Image (cartoon, rainbow, N blue to C red):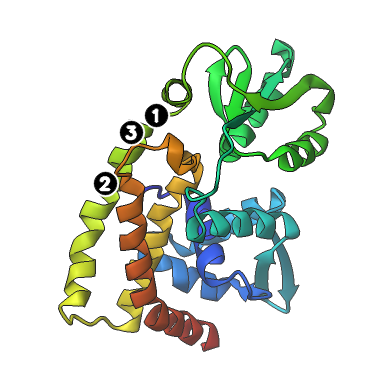
């Protein structure tokens, strides 16, 4: 899988299978994460750390510990789920760019790094020297981010059309590595297509296997929510490798969902 970091595996589990479950016994979480290489102790450690970071909430009932998503954790996963299932390539674009500039001193480097990470998550690309841009009009999200991070007085944001200099496509090439992203999408399609083809030929899978397949599928596909700026079609090469990757993903996800959900329900019913 793309990342074997315990925190990422826990996020995948909650985002894909437990988003609507209020309080999950740690024993059930251990059982659901064991197929992906996490030990009993490893699961308990990462859950405790994520609770301290504010992603999960915990409670005890006698000898048993239960974990659930906090509002902060739920908001992160719901935003990620929306990107996975509703990519924004088909949005109309009027040719305008949202441009953001920041001025954060060297002594506040950690704040600057957090801001860069958040801008990347929002789909901004860096053109250099603290200047970022995106074709999406997400001014409201930028304002919300700035208020939450306390950096509103250090940002300058405006929106307008490009008039001189590099073309729109040249701006895209400077800000994002679409060639690398296309290769990653193509690699995903190549590796998962055989399983898709086997189902189309009538192959079957039991619910435990379906759970493991679907977990790995969504865990790997999540990377694209971090790497893809979801540019409008006018700014993408044609054909776009993301289309085939999404077709493979959706087909397999639909095929695996029923038995995978049954497996999770079966585990959660066990004492």
**Residue farthest toward the left in the current orientation of the protein:** 201
Residue shown at 15%/78% (left/top)? Answer: 201
Expressed as whole percent of the image width and height from the top left, the position of residue 263 reads 42, 82
Vertical position of residue 59 compared to residue 42: above or below = below
Q: Residues within 10 Å of mark 3 (few under 14, many from 20)?
A: few
Circle number at residue 186:
2
Vertical position of residue 37 compared to residue 255: above or below = above
Q: Which residue is mark 3?
A: 180
Vertical position of residue 62 compared to residue 228: above or below = below
Could you tell me which quadrant the C terminus lies in? bottom right
In which quadrant of the rendered view does residue 58 lie?
bottom right
Q: Earlier in the sequence, mark 3 or mark 2?
A: 3
Expressed as whole percent of the image width and height from the top left, the position of residue 207 reads 35, 82
SS class, disc 3 = helix
Expressed as whole percent of the image width and height from the top left, the position of residue 35 reads 36, 67
Q: Which residue is mark 1?
A: 177
| Residue 81 in view here | yes
> From the viewer's perspective, is 151 left or right of 110?
right
> From the viewer's perspective, is 190 left or right of 26?
left
SS class, disc 1 = loop
Marks 3,1: beta carbons within 8 A: yes
Residue shown at 38%/33% (left/top)? Answer: 178
How many marks do you count on the picture? 3
Q: Earlier in the sequence, mark 1 or mark 2?
A: 1
Distance between the Cα atoms at labels 3 and 1?
Answer: 5 Å
Marks 1,2: beta carbons within 8 A: no
């Amino acid at each position: 899988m793309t990342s074997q970091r315990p925190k990422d595996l826990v996020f995948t589990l909650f985002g894909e299978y437990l988003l609507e479950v209020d309080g999950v016994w740690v024993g059930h979480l251990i059982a659901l994460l064991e197929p992906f290489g996490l030990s009993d102790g490893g699961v308990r450690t990462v859950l405790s750390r994520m609770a301290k970071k504010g992603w999960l909430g915990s409670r005890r009932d006698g000898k048993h510990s239960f974990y659930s998503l906090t509002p902060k954790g739920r908001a992160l996963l719901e935003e990620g789920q929306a990107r996975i299932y509703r990519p924004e390539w088909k949005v109309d674009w009027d040719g305008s760019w949202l441009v953001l500039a920041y001025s954060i001193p060297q002594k506040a480097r950690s704040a600057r790094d957090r801001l860069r990470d958040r801008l990347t998550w929002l789909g901004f690309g860096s053109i250099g020297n603290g200047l970022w841009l995106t074709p999406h009009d997400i001014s409201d999200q930028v304002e919300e981010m700035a208020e939450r991070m306390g950096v509103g007085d250090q940002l300058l944001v405006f929106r307008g059309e490009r008039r001189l200099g590099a073309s729109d496509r040249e701006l895209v090439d400077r800000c994002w590595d679409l060639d690398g992203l296309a290769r990653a999408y193509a690699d995903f399609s190549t590796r998962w297509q055989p399983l898709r083809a086997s189902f189309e030929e009538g192959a079957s899978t039991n619910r435990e296997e379906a759970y493991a397949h679907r977990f790995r599928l969504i865990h790997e596909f999540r990377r694209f929510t971090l790497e893809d700026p979801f540019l409008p079609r006018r700014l993408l090469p044609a054909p776009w490798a993301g289309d085939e990757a999404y077709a493979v993903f959706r087909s397999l996800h639909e095929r695996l969902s029923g038995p995978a959900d049954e497996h999770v329900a079966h585990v959660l019913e066990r004492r």
